Image: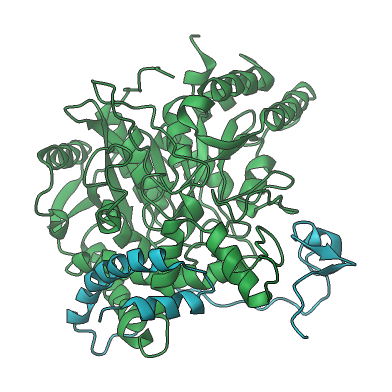
Chain colours: A cyan, B green
Amino acid sequence: MSVDTATVAKIASLARIKVSEPELEAMVPELNGILAWVEQLGEVDVSGVEPMTAVIPNTLRLRDDVIDADPLTGGDKRDAVLANAPAAEHGFFGVPKVIE
Amino acid sequence: MSDITDLGVAALRDGVAAGQFSAVEVAEAFNANVAAAQDALNAFIVVTPEKAVEAARAVDAKRAAGEALGAMAGVPIGMKDLFATFGVQTTAASHMLEGFVPQYESTVSQKLWDAGAGMLGKLNLDQFAMGSSNETSHFGNVISPWRRPDGKAQLTPGGSSGGSSAAIAARLAPAATGTDTGGSIRQPAAFTGTTGIKPTYGRCSRWGVVAFASSLDQPGSMGRDVTDCAIMLEAMAGFDPKDSTSLDLPVPAWTASLSADMKGKKVGIPREYRADGMPAEIDAVWEQGIAWLKDAGAEVVEVSLPHTKYALPTYYIIAPAEASSNLARYDGVRYGLRDLPDGAGLQDMYAATRAAGFGPEVKRRILIGTYVLSAGFYDAYYTQAQKVRTLISQDFARAFEQVDVLLTPTAPSAAFALGENVDDPLAMYLNDVFTVPASLAGLPAMSVPAGLDAQGLPLGLQIIGRPLDEQGVLNAGLAIESRAGFTAKPGKWW
């Protein structure tokens, strides 16, 4: 399968990356080169093979349902959470207006 | 004693403990080397000489008080700038995270500080760890301290842990953290005549490590020799409830159990790694490694890993897919860069922010990942790749029924010149041909220096072990190291 300019524009839009027209043109052959190369996987017989889910057998743990069980990742961290926000306002993340 | 900065982790720690020199003297000696090399090598994004001295003072005070010292006490290290460090800018070498100052400390770095290590600075890397040559950093290329005899071309220190490998080779740090997703510890180690180990997936916590491909990312240690890597890995590893894939297992005493005796051990040579067009020098160093392990008492047998040729294309579906998902967090809202064009709405802000914050290779991988995960293509690409990944993992499991470790070259060439591969993403990806398979299977693997090529550049050998058998990997590494007698270091030109 190969991609054209319109498809790459669509992917870029899904990925929320603004791409200029010349950038799009340059990306099409690059992505096609990579996609053509990975498509060799299609020749592998995978009938009866389960997709990998964990390389090392492990179980997903549940922690006790306790507030602030870990003080580092518990609550009451507003200022630390906002410390790197590009536009923190009144204790919230500021974003452009989304409702007219 | 000649120069403190010629010493490794074990010698520095033991020297501080014995009072041969103080931890502050050690920190100041490495701080001086870091400062003198920064303009030429660009190994660090941020230097933190005050942090190194502060940690050293604490160690000296503890020693004076007769308190027990940690396993890394008095050893200043470089921290790959992928680990979140409290109060110190953490960028993943991206413009997106320029100015990001974590309000928390990664588990791995905290463990190292708790063990008495100090921080010389944050090491440069490929942007979001995506690259094999350290040419995708927003903060400029790292220049390898190694040069060809004519001295003309600037060489790559490898990637993505290129700042780590360059700093160790140039004696700016006795050891450094690395992270390995498809070879990012092992290939830079091979290119710079240094040693590095990626443990079994889940041994070291990923908490506080900027995510690239979460099913593959694994922190590890890099240093001058096998013993130093073992000491440091022991300090880094261990169960962390904050990482859902962390292994709830005790950390073995790897350092105390080190042994270069390979009697009764079987070493496998995967025949599929004998790639067409492999340079004769790589083949020769591999043969030399086989001879060394036989000399150490091992039996060497050929094994087959039939799906090896599919490992790279599998990796270049799975890693970008996970990256496209992980990097969705960079939206200009909670942290990092925000680009808000005049009159832009929320969606425009996302797109503009991500266009401005990500470099070309990162965008390329996000787009590939978005495509292979998109409706209609998911099964053909992503599910197929995860099935092939199962087959690759099964290949290894079968091989390990016959042998204890595998021996391969680490990289298909010595370090190349900066700029040589940048225009061809596929040629760059091929650098990881020998390292990616073990990553896909989550296996412990390390690179040890084995010799020099005709141009005087280092070549490395890779040892791959069974899941959780870091000891077997380290021991085979030590068997090679003690026979290779690798003492070469780059001539100082910076």
**Residue B408 image offset from top left, x and y in percent:** 22, 49
**Above or below for B278 versus B152:** below
- The answer to which quarter of the image holds residue B310 is bottom left
- The answer to which quarter of the image holds residue A66 is bottom right
Which residue occupies 45% across, 68% down?
B366
Is B301 left or right of B207, judged from the image as shown?
Answer: left
Q: Is residue B255 visible?
A: no
- Who is closer to the viewer here, B465 or B104? B104
> Is the C terminus of chain B in the top left, top right, bottom left or bottom right quadrant?
top left
Which residue occupies 70% across, 71% down?
B343
Q: Is residue A28 visible?
A: yes
**Residue B22 image offset from top left, x and y in percent:** 67, 18
In the rendered picture of this protein, how many numbered marks are placed on residues?
Answer: 0
Which residue occupies 68% across, 52% down?
B100
Is B478 left or right of B293, judged from the image as shown?
Answer: right
**Above or below for B480 versus B444:** above
- Who is closer to the viewer here, B327 or A19? A19
- Who is closer to the viewer here, A80 or B477? A80
Is B213 left or right of B412, judged from the image as shown?
Answer: right
Which residue occupies 21% across, 47% down?
B412
Specify the farthest residue to the top. B1
Specify the farthest residue to the right. A90
**Residue A55 image offset from top left, x and y in percent:** 41, 70
- Who is closer to the viewer here, B440 or B34? B34
**Above or below for B54 versus B210:** above
**Residue B453 image offset from top left, x and y in percent:** 19, 30
